[in-house]
Image: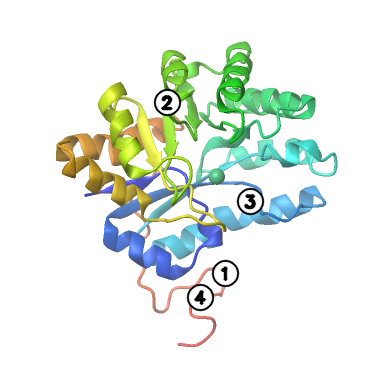
Amino acid sequence: MRIFDPHIHMTSRTTDDYEAMHAAGVRAVVEPSFWLGQPRTSPASFLDYFDALLGWEPFRAAQYGIAHHCTLALNPKEANDPRCVPVLDELPRYLVKDQVVAVGEIGYDSMTPAEDTVLAAQLQLAADHALPALVHTPHRDKLAGLRRTLDVVRESALPPEHVLLDHLNETTVKEAKDSGGWLGFSVYPDTKMDEERMVAILRQYGSEKVLVNSAADWGRSDPLKTRRVGDAMLANGFTEDDVDLVLWRNPVAFYGISGRLALDPEGTSATGATHEGNSILRGGE
Ligand SMILES: [Zn+2]
């Protein structure tokens, strides 16, 4: 089973996770820039983070045979902090970089006027750079959040088929599908979507334009949830081709809109390789 996790925050994970992911079949990931849990106080903090997503993190992934790309943006939560918003002026010089395959994750957190402005501005940035957009839908008040998101997308210059609507569930999948966008589902331990509910959604709505991700980050999450969905699909009568469509070909097609996907990680071995003089061995060989 070949797996592309289209939304995972590897910065928050260890190399043990990369190793386990590779053993489970993961060969490609996209890491969206997001909220770090601790508020940032200036655009400079974002730029160091973006540089890590473009340099150190793909280097770490390549040690484990995994291709790493990223999506960059001001995240919805920090869109409310006037200290952070000026990072929008820095984004254009980052969005031209080869490993950036979308603008994201953008969208709504609390649905404030500041979030409206920043979402519209970043959809425009995506259109200007011929990039698709990864749009997070809010975890609270989901259907209202999706509808408001779709209104802003419709008013934007970005065609709906260049938008991935993420964190969907049973209450939002129908309207998201009708919008013409791509459909993202984050499968977590305990909360939100799980493997069995995911299989039921695939049975009801089909696998066309559906992407499944672990959204694993610094909180309770599981970087192997993509594999667990693949196994649950097979156990419930889906074919290997169905699994390959959802876990590989759909993410390749969506992020391929950028024209920048490069799916062979530079296959360097874990010993000896360095990134700007630093290895993942913490100095000890
Ligand atoms: Zn995320």
Q: Residue 70: image x %, image y %?
A: 52, 46
Picture quadrant where residue 45 is located: bottom right
Q: Residue 143: image x %, image y %?
A: 55, 22
Residue count near mark 1 (Cα–Cα under 10 Å), binned few <14, some 14–19, many ≥20: few
Q: Earlier in the sequence, mark 1 or mark 3?
A: 3
Spatial CA span between label 2 and label 1: 37 Å
Picture quadrant where residue 255 is located: top left
Q: Is residue 277 above or below residue 1?
A: below
From the image, tell me which residue sits under label 1: 276
The residue tagged with tag 4: helix, strand or loop? loop
Q: Are marks 3 and 2 in contact (CB under 8 Å)?
A: no
- Of the two numbered discs 1 and 3 in the rendering, the one whose residue sits closer to the viewer: 3
Q: Earlier in the sequence, mark 3 or mark 2?
A: 3
The circle on residue 182 is: 2
Spatial CA span between label 1 and label 4: 9 Å
Spatial CA span between label 4 and label 2: 37 Å
From the image, tell me which residue sits under label 3: 50
Q: Which quadrant of the figure shows ligand 1?
A: top right
Residue count near mark 2 (Cα–Cα under 10 Å), binned few <14, some 14–19, many ≥20: many
| Residue at image point 54% right, 84% down | 283
From the image, tell me which residue sits under label 4: 279
Q: Is residue 53 left or right of residue 7?
A: right
